[in-house]
Amino acid sequence: MTRALLVVLTLCLATSAHGADLPLTLDWAGPPPARALPVTGGLPLARGVLRDERELHLLAGGAELPLQTRTLAVWPDGSLKWVLLDFQTTAASLTLRWGVGPRALPAGIVARAEAGGVSLDTGALRLSVRGDGCGFVDELAAGGQPALSAGTRRLNVLDFLHTAAPADYTPQDRWLKQAQSDPSRIVVQSVSLEQAGPLHAVVLVTGVYRYALVGSTITGTEVRGDCPFRLRLHAYAGSSLLRVEHFFSYEGDGDHDFGHALSLRLPAPAGAATVRFVGAATAGAPGPLAGLYQPDAGSYQVWRSEGRALERLAGGRRFEGLMDVSGPGQALAVGVRGFWQQGAKSLHADLRDGLVCANLWAPEAPPLDFRRHAREKSVGEAGGPDVAQGTQPEPFAPRGDGPWRNYRLASKGVGKSHDLLFWLHDPALPESELRAGWRWLEHRPLLWAPPHHYAASLALGPYRERVATSFDDIEAALERPVDFWRQSREKFGWYGFWLYGNVAQSYNEYIPNGRWATDFGRWGWANGDSVGRLAYALMLQAVRKGERADFEFAESYLRHVHDVCSVHTPAWPENYSGNWVYVKGAAHRHDSWPWGDLYVGARGAHPVGAKIDYYLTGDGRAKDILDEITQLALRNPNGGAGDGPLGPNAQIFLYQWEATGDPVWLGRLRAELDGSELLKTAEGGWLVMMSAAFGIKDALDEYIDLTGDRAKAPLAASFAERCLPAQMKNHWTWGGYFRVYAAAYRFTGDAKYRRAIEDMLPRLREADAGSAATVLPPDQWPGLPGGPSVFVDGNIIRDIPFALAVLAEEGR
Amino acid sequence: MKLWWHRPTGRWRAWVLLSLPWLGAAHGATLTGIDLALTVEPGGCGLVDKLTYQGADLLAAPAGFVGAGLTLAPAGDGSLDSLFGHRAAGELPARLTSVTAEGGRLVAIGAYTDGQISVPFRRTITAAPDDPLLIVEEETDYTALPLDRLVARHRLALPLVLPADAHERLLGLGGQTRAELFRMDQNDVRRTNQNLSDNRAYWPYWDLGGLIQRPGGYSLWKANHADTLALPLEEGQQSAGWADFSSLRSGLTLRRLDADRAAPYALTIDARAGWLALDLWPAAEPPIAGAALGRRMVRYALLPHETSWPVPYRCELPRERYLAMLRWLDEKAPGQQDSHLSFYAAARLGTGDIATIMDKERIQPSTVLRTFYHADAWRMGGLAKTILGIDVPRNQSQAAWEQVAQKMLDAIAKNGVPRH
């Protein structure tokens, strides 16, 4: 009742004489740009507010902007739930208006699908991608200049080195003793116009990198060797900016197939003679070969070469900028998002052969290592040894055979996504605009409604947004661990190709040696599991506060979890055995390395964080994550290790239902809820907490809210009865029930559930009070050996906002 | 101790031993310093063939060990891709043509050569007059390298004498603000099972560890084996520039003395194969032309030490005082089954064994005390009363406890502990 009133009140307040207005802010991560830049951002609307996205108008300073919209999710009544907006502006404040009739649809990009390929004309940029082409851009032209043509060049490259034995490569060396070069050959499988425009068009290219040797040592499955890739090319009306999303996954044998170079390339502009690296300062590099190499987060070097050896010209710490290669008629600027954070990376210009390269794995670096971190079971999160009283760790496969013989394929299916910018422009473009272009890539403009709008829309459930001077002690307990992590990322250097985005989870705990437990194994890198549904929690915090720092931290974490920690192969060797299973989309559990644990399950790939990211950004990669998990739920409902029924299945069916409006997904959701014995019978702490933490209980609550099916409300209440503070206050799972109580209170109105929240909050305050993040001032984080550990629980960060909504409604 | 202050004057205790002639061209030599003796054989490994400290061998080169070598890469053929090959183009081991020792200084002259290419070098090792310390100055003329060859790695490797018991092989690396200490074989610890998913599980081996310092940034890493991937330990801007290998009784620290201008360089320890290497040009860097390196001088120190504590990572208390403190904490009150150490510190540290705390884990005294006041303020307050004779509020902040702990350590350093 109170919630409904809140929604109505919100709508009334937002309604003006023109219809309804929603004030928006545009966070440019700095001053607004001098020239209009493309913006893509998603917003929720409350149930019943609007049924037709064409009625949305966007105003800047009273003037209506050309606007492209796309419905991402709908409410059960068909009204709009999440809408994606595309527009271009220099403004920092905007107004979204509806209720004044349909808007005029803008003209813009002309797109054609033809002969297995796609061509686009934005008015400032023409590009074509062929079905039998290079797997990237086959022709690119801007400003009346001659087109850059791929010809027979390799412009999309993932090259490997194949060795006979893993001992051929010692960590941090450069060479492999007996390696054979295994260059990729592109096989394009599809080219499609995923989004036609008119302001923002997306070309989707899928295919595989094919090899002579990669994967040749894998036996027992046909899925080997070919490494899949997906490319999305984003073009914008009237703009020559070309944003590129790239994703690949690995189908090689970690012991034998080492990465040499991962690169997207374009032909250089005609007559290109100048190379400069435009960052905070600008460094020039005379050719004919020039580059900038960032091996890690600590340093970079600018080099040039005649083709015999690199000559170092300059250096710095972290390169934040674009490489710009200029000819007399036009210039091409190239950049990679997260360049220094995800090394080793480099940018190359070959003025002799006319080639510009963005190296996502730099060929300057040692080989990209896909091996496992240990060759023994019982080391880290991989099960116990056979001999209980043994004194040595036991090798998985001492003679190369046995039940764990495929342990060397631990990295099979690991993936990685990147965002890049290729920008054809006038050579006279000021450097300030190039820097603005880099900022646009690195820190995308974020479209924010007031935090209350998201909460009041109920599109992410009945939570309470961050309200200043309200529940400050509780809010601080949610924020401090995240701040602690953010600072630790920098202090300990949680960067690099395989690690950026992940967080270590246990500090000074168990063994208070002043170290994170990444050294030891199980409680090392969080991946998607042990600290809870952290991607969900972090994304929700970003929306609750409307702050860029929270969003970017959340996004880097969830990208890492769903890229590196997850399995993207359709054939995974279950428990390192010869039994190949479909767990594509599921994640490795926490360990001392992202792919260290043989346990692979859907719970680590809980989809709600990616869902929020997709609704906020419309990113193709986020959509792919959700589609991959959907296929997992359909093809292997078990989800790997029995995880699917714990919640990920129900959560992904909820997403598909709202994304498509198709009732078949509602049917699947119902079946998942009805089939859950844990919802009906779980007792004893762990099983109850797991059902709440992993998503099945949240899905039940959301189902009741969405459908109004009150017949299931007693089940929600009975679930809460099984975890009231009387039983759980002193149980180690105490933090897992705040949202359970909140839901039971909403569904029944029984005050005992609200009291349960109040009874359990002192446990949170107590845990927070003893945490290193609280005991120590930030300048002393993370603390000294022997000192306090940090208290962090992603499930609590996720769930408390729902409990606060209950308390706030009662004016507490 | 300012290691680089020592000059070749003062109380020399060095003397020269003639060794067997090598190829009729040169003689080996032994340089001695405070409690140490270093031997270089012209026909030996090319760096240090033997180092003894207090009568025990720290370094000893087995037959075939390459103590110094240049690994070459082919120069590019003019194309972009050819600049980034992953194949070596030959090894040039160091050959000494002259070794002399005189006045506390050993000079080794030779070349990195395969018989066709010859890159000359000159090495001067100076024994410090007052400390167990050797300072090495190494000058290499890379310009002698032909234009079609690049330096892929320039490695100086010390042949470690390994304790037979793998549990006694201890590694250390110097980061910017902390030392990274670990052991090759930690599976005997079995401290708290919560670290692992299975209560019969083990900690991993850490056979290798290393440091790479680039201009402006460094990273530390370790690896289970030579054929597994490297795991990062930390990153920063300027490392402390040292690596250490120790047994429970003694060890050797290698430290760059010109770290601020020497990058890139790398330090690597392989406690399975038995070497500690300083790479004057690390293999992780793109190969470089000899002309770009020019004629280059580098300086580093070899620091033998007692106990397992690396020289740059000092124990906060003199050893005897620390031992006394731990014994004092391990005393049981009449009628009690547990001591402070076994009841509280052991639960937090995972061990109450004094030798393990001091020599294997290398836990600082302040850490031992912190386990008390973090977990049990009353216990710590009682200890403070005993040591300092003052009453300490039990509910004070962590920062205030830190000050009390420091006073206790100062008092123990000065006066010892009660009844010891």
Image (cartoon, coloured by chain):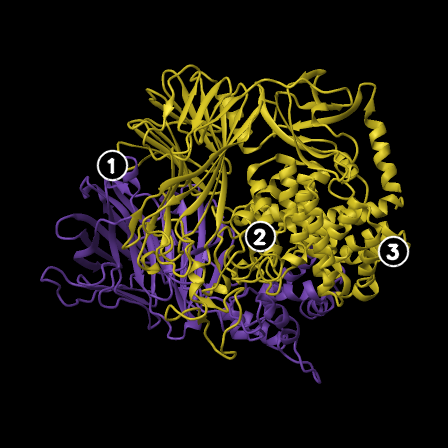
- Mark 3 and mark 2: span between their CA atoms? 39 Å
Query: Residue A755 shows which numbered tag?
Result: 3
Question: In this image, B150 relative to A689: left or right?
Answer: left
- Mark 2 and mark 1: span between their CA atoms? 50 Å
Name the residue located 47 percent from the left edge and 77 percent from the top edge: A391
Give the percent coordinates (x, y) of residue B153.
Answer: 29, 49
Mark 1, residue position: A308
User: Which of marks 1 and 2 precedes in the sequence?
Assistant: 1
**Which mark is in front, 3 or 2?**
2
Q: Dot 2, crowdedness within 10 Å: few (<14), some or many (≥20)? A: many
Q: Residue furthest bottom?
A: B335
Name the residue located 48 percent from the left edge and 56 percent from the top edge: A571
Q: What residue type is labelled 2?
A: Leu
Give the percent coordinates (x, y) of residue A293.
Answer: 39, 38
**Which mark is in front, 1 or 3?**
3
Give the percent coordinates (x, y) of residue A534.
Answer: 65, 50
Which chain letter goes with mark 1?
A
Which chain letter goes with mark 3?
A
Pointers 1 and 3 in contact (C-beta within 8 Å): no
- Mark 1 and mark 3: span between their CA atoms? 74 Å
Query: Residue A632 shows which numbered tag?
Result: 2
Question: In this image, A749 relative to B407: left or right?
Answer: right
Q: Which chain is purple?
A: B
Q: Which chain is yellow?
A: A
> In this orientation, does residue A474 appear?
no
